Amino acid sequence: MRVNVEVNGEQRTADDVWPGESLLYVLRERLGLPGAKNACEQGECGSCTVYLDGTPVCACLVAAGQVEGRSVRTVEGLGSAEELDPVQDAFVRTGAVQCGFCTPGLVVAAHDLVHRKPDASDAEIREALAGNLCRCTGYEKILDAVRMAAVAVKEQRS
Amino acid sequence: MDFLRPSTLDEALAMKAEFPDAVPIAGGTDVMVELNFDVRRPPALLDLGLVTELSGWTRENGHVRLGATVPYTRIVTELGDVLPGLAMAARTVGSPQIRNRGTVGGNLGSASPAGDAHPPLVAVGADIEVASTRGSRTVPAREFFTAPKKSALEPDELIVAIQVPEAAGPQQFAKVGTRNAMVIAVCSFAVTLDVAGKGVGTGIGSAGPTPLRALEAERFAAAELPWGSGEPLQENIVRAFGELVGAAARPIDDVRGTAAYRRHALSVLARRTLGWAWRSVPQEVAK
Ligand SMILES: Cc1cc2nc3c(=O)[nH]c(=O)nc-3n(C[C@H](O)[C@H](O)[C@H](O)COP(=O)(O)OP(=O)(O)OC[C@H]3O[C@@H](n4cnc5c(N)ncnc54)[C@H](O)[C@@H]3O)c2cc1C
Ligand code: FES
Ligand code: FES
C-alpha cells in the first residue's frame, strides 16, 4: 500500500508498504531517515521517539497506515548539523551523548518537555524521560542537558 | 494483510461484521508489539484512529462516557477530578509515549489480568458499551472479563465507550512493580468510597485469571467504617480489610512474583489505599 505523510515539513510518499509494518520501519527503511533508532520494537526503550501531530510517540508502535495524512517530526527535523536545536546543543555541551544510540529519542522527548514545561522540576524531568533508556550515561548528564536546554528555551521566549 | 480505515462508527461496525478476523487497532501499543515480533499475523488491521465517535468524552447524568480511543494522557489531564481512580491508574501506565497512544478501549480489548485500567473500572462499577451491526449493549466491567485475555466481546463487536460513574468520594489506586515506569503490575488494587451512600468498591488486578472484586472486604468496610464521624480509621478495621482483600485474590506463581507474595502485597496495598482514601474524605461531609 501507499502511505502519504508529512515528515519534517515535507510531503513524502512511501510505496509498497506492508500494512503491518511500523512507522519506524517506514522512516528508516523507506524514507531514508535513520535518526529514530530501532532498539527494542516493543515500546520499552524510547529510542524511536518521534512527534506524531506534535505528540511524542514510539514510532515502533504506530502502524504505517495510521500516519496517512498526518504529520511526523523526527530528530532530523529539529535542527541541522550547521544549526543545532538548543536541545541538541545542550546534549553535546553537557556530555549527555556517549554511544549515541538513545540520543535521538531522548532529544525528541526532552524537546517536547522543555517546550511544554520549561520550568519542569527534576522529578518532572525524570518522569518525562521515564520511557527512554540509556545504557551508557547514568542519566545525570542527560538531566544536565535538559536543564540547560530549558534555560535556553526560556531565554528564547523572553 | 489489509489495512481498513473506517471514518465513522457505522463504517467501522460494517467492516467488523464483514471481516470479523480483522484486528482493531487503536493506540497500537499491544497490537504492534505482537506484529513486530510476528506473534500474530491477522488478515487485516482495522484502524480506529479516524472514528471521531470513539475519540472524545462527555459527562451525562452522573457518569463520564469515555470514548474507547481516548488516550491515557488525556484521562490524566482532563478527567483527574471526576474519575480520580481511573486517572491515577492511567498515570502508572508505561511511559509518557505509551500513555500518549494507549487507550482504555485497547486495555479492555487485550483483557490482560494485569491491565491497569481494569481495577478502577471494576471498583466503581463501570459499564462497557459495545456495538455491532446487530445493535449495541452494555456489559458491566465486573462481568466483562471471562478468562486471562478473554472477554465478553463478540467477534463482530467493537468497544465504543466506557460509562464510568463520577466519583462519589475519594478513590485510590496502587500497584506493585520493580520501578515506577514501564511496569506490568505484580499486583494492583483500586478502592472507591461512596461517602453519601456509605459504600465501598474494590478492584484487584494481576492476582487472578481476571480482574476481581473483593466482595467480602467491600461489605465489611461498608459496615464498619465510621461514616460521618470524621474519626480516623481504627487499625483493626484496616487490617481486617487488607486480609479480606488478600483472601479474595486468586493469584498464581509466575515470573513477576509468587502467589503468596501477591496475596501479602495486596493486603498491604488495600490497607494503605483505604487509609489514604479515608483521610481525604472531605471533613465537612464527614462531620
Ligand atoms: C512499553 C509498554 C508498557 C506498557 N505498560 C502498561 C502498563 O503499565 N499497564 C497496562 O495496563 N498496560 C501497559 N501496556 C499495554 C498497553 O499499553 C495497554 O494495554 C493499552 O491500554 C492498550 O491500548 P491501545 O489503544 O494501544 O491498544 P491496541 O494495541 O490498539 O489494541 C489492544 C487490543 O484491543 C483491541 N481493541 C482496541 N480497541 C478496541 C475497540 N475499540 N474495540 C474492540 N477491540 C479493541 C485490539 O484489537 C487489540 O486486541 C504497555 C505496553 C507497552 C508496549
Ligand atoms: S524501538 Fe521503539 S521503543 Fe524501543
Ligand atoms: S548514550 Fe549510549 S545508550 Fe545512551
Image (cartoon, coloured by chain):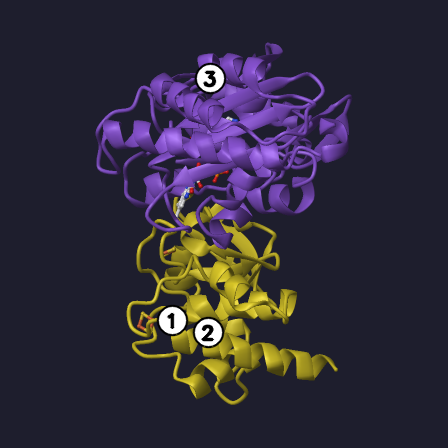
Chain colours: A yellow, B purple
Disc 2 on helix, strand or loop?
A: helix
Q: Position of residue A151 (x, y in %)?
A: 61, 81
Tell me the CA gap for discs 3 and 2.
Answer: 44 Å
Chain letter of disc 1 in the image: A
- Residue type marked 3: Ala
- Is residue B9 shown left or right of residue A20? right
Q: Look at mark 2 in the image and give the residue it sits on.
A: A143
Within the image, what quadrant is residue A149 found in?
bottom right
Q: Quadrant of the N terminus of chain B?
A: top left
On the image, the x and y values in percent for residue A129 come to: 46, 62
Chain where mark 2 sits: A
Crowding near the residue tagged with mark 3, few <14, some 14–19, many ≥20 C-alpha atoms within 10 Å: many
Residue B219 image point, x, y percent: 52, 12
Q: Which residue is mark 1?
A: A139
Q: Position of residue A89 (x, y in %)?
A: 50, 84
Residue type at tag 2: Leu
Which image quarter has ligand 2? Answer: bottom left
Q: Quadrant of residue B224?
A: top right
